[in-house]
Amino acid sequence: MFHFATRLFLVLILLSMGGVAPAAVWAAVNDSFTVEVADVGKGADLAALLKGKGYTTVVPAKNMWVTDPQNNCAVWIGKNVPLEMLRAVLPEAMRFNPYLKFFYVVGDRGEKPPQAVDNTVHVGGSIEAALVKKLNIIDQQEMLSALGKAASLEDLHRYLHDKNKPKPEEKPAS
Amino acid sequence: MKKLFAALTCLAMLLALSVPAALAGRPVADKTAPTTTASPLGGTFTSAVTVTLSVNEPATTYYTTDGSTPTTSSTVYSAPLTFSTTKTLKYFSKDTAGNLETVKSQTYTISGSTSTHATLTWTGYAMCSSCHTSQAQAMYQGVHYQWKGSAAEMTTGPATQGKIDATDGSSALNAYCINIQGNWGPCGACHAGTGAKPVATSTPSSAQLASIDCLMCHADATNAPYSRVRNATTGLFEPAAGLDMNLVVQKAGQKPTRKNCLGCHAKAGGGDAVKRGDIALASGTTSDVLYDTHMAMGNGGNIQCQGCHSFVGHRVAGRGSDLRPEDSTTEVTCSTTACHPTKGTATGHTTTDVNRHVTRIACQTCHISKYAKNANDTANTEATETNRNWQVAEWNATLNRYEPMPTKANDLVPQYAFWNGTSWGNNALNAAVLDTATNAYKISRPVGAINDPVGTKLFPFKYKTANQALANGKVVTISTATFFATGNYDQSVKDGMTYMGIPSTTAYTNVTTDELQVLNHQVPPATGNVLACASCHPNATATQVKLITNLGYGLKAPTSVVCSQCHNEKSPRDYVSMHNHVNVKGYDCSLCHNFSRPERGLKMTPN
């Protein structure tokens, strides 16, 4: 009886260590990266959900460019944000804001943002910025597919770089 | 003895019990003012509205509908009031104890063309100008659409000036984004058009008229709110998804409300209250009369923007001192028959001393003692920007770009200057001018001086600075596009110089620029808030402005010279005594100072 109890205890300890160790590692990884969610539509719900999944999540204070899900339809992806994190965050972001249509890796065109931006994925960037950068619309299903297919983070960055290549100028009616 | 004691005790107890009872029976003095409620409250109505006034106790209610403040001589309310045209209802009640309620105000805006609009179906922006063609043509030529216009009130630059980028000296600089060049997109988010840059033509085509977004100003922001988004492909605006655009256009037959105007004007400069200092989103929502007694709801005047900024033919009255174009030659004034008809006259105020000021001191000077106030019922702080430093970049996560570092503040004391209604401005490619008084390069200034003729008055201004670059004697129209993308100030300056035709290898220096912007809003109730004499007089102890130190009110010569015009030199006495020379003896200011006040009919020579 004693031996059985000891064995059971040791088995439980080993099982729990096996579960805890990766979780601790994953939490440490998550702590290095941040999800910023614009305070529009169901942004607060998205932030709560992601926080519940262990991601460091921030809802920045509103400014005049944070208005509604349609105008805040861009995702700014920090260049160091891991692929696995993007695979977890972006589908939820699209579920909460079906208008997300611009996905851009910050620095893709030579920008040098503050270091913290490289480790941040910002959900709900302004369409005004997307248009100034002449980004292209990426269909959500296509984006989800690319996320699934990407063999590496570099692979995903390459895909987004190609998709966002500026198209020839279209002159608006005056 | 015991019986006597018992009897006395009983009597005392009876007295003790009966006194409170007797006191309770006495009437308590009523010192509470009655409360009158209007139903419905003011707002925009598509047809005639019937308004009922009710009081919470027996009282007599007095009211006016012509904008004047009601008194006990005004009309007594006896039955519901029906308004078929826009009216401002002001009312108060007096109860039977004589308690007076503070005057309340509600504005009932009756939109005119409802009958036609009621059956409309949204077909696109062109539908507005297809019916309202003459209005669209008028709007097309106005400053709200062209973002430039007559510079008749500018003492510098060409006849037409404004915000639109140009290299002909007509494009305004400011101490915020410096110049619009290269930044039409985000700036254009506040343009009353559908996204395309305005084309200046006296004969706009129907397609050009259709590029006016009438809904920005005419949508019913309360009952059928309109919002727009950029089409991600064309960059042009279109109605936001999910809107009932039929309802929006059906309700759109109204004049602009504060929500419409403040949607852009409160956010000028990049955020709430950033630019103007006296205008914020709170101006349209607050009930804090100390913030703005004119615009506040509740016990405030609830005055709409158009109450002062009248429109004729889509041209608006009123121009900020730092704005280059004027849309209308009509001036905004406090002394209208509906508002303060006598306050601009020589007997309009209660004291002679104050009445003497009105020909030379603008109402705002005494009635706006501080600006960038924090309304007590809003989440925002309403802080305004006082400096913008382009040499320090901050990251804006929403716009995924760098922005210059701002400094903001609340409760600022205005700067004061004489203003004759015209302005001096430094535009893109103009030679920069150093103001030795501020040691900064001037971006805009009110024109006027202490010795100007009647018409020039002392006004309060917001003072704003920026850290910018100067090359070849000109303020550099920094490339905001480069700065936003990279945060690289040096490269942004070089790209700006290239735009200006200056070789990018040219050495530049970093300088401070500054501008003054007239303050007209955020007037609190006069009682307890208007500046007192001691705020400005005498110079040594003045708390608001030093008239001698800063505004040219000093003596024109030493007392040995000034006094000996009439008598031997004397030691200067206190401020009031010294001014008996004017107020009692009737000598003009010019005998002692470098300015004259001929309108007062004073003696111009010593005798």
Image: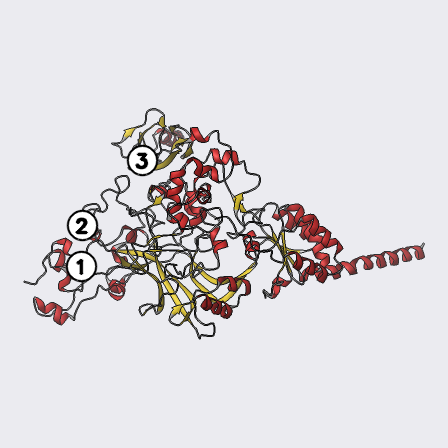
Q: Position of residue A95 (x, y in %)?
A: 67, 46
Q: Is the same chain shared between marks 2 and 3?
A: yes
Q: Residue at x 18, y 59 (%)?
A: B576
Q: Earlier in the sequence, mark 2 or mark 1?
A: 2
Q: Quadrant of residue B134?
A: top left
Q: Which residue is mark 2?
A: B352
Name which residue type carries label 1: Val
Q: Earlier in the sequence, mark 1 or mark 3?
A: 3
Q: Position of residue A97 (x, y in %)?
A: 63, 46
Q: Residue at x 38, y 49 (%)?
A: B143
Q: Nearer the viewer, mark 2 or mark 3?
A: 2
Answer left or right for B383 relative to B562: right
Question: What secondary structure is found at the residue carrying circle 3?
Answer: loop
Label 2 and label 1: CA atoms lie apart by 13 Å
Q: Quadrant of residue B284?
A: top left
Q: Are marks 2 and 1 in contact (CB under 8 Å)?
A: no
Which quarter of the rendering shows the N terminus of chain B? top left
Which quarter of the rendering shows the C terminus of chain B? bottom left
- As rendered, which of B135 and B300 lies closer to the eye? B135
Q: Which residue is mark 1?
A: B576
Query: What label does residue B100 carry, if any?
Result: 3
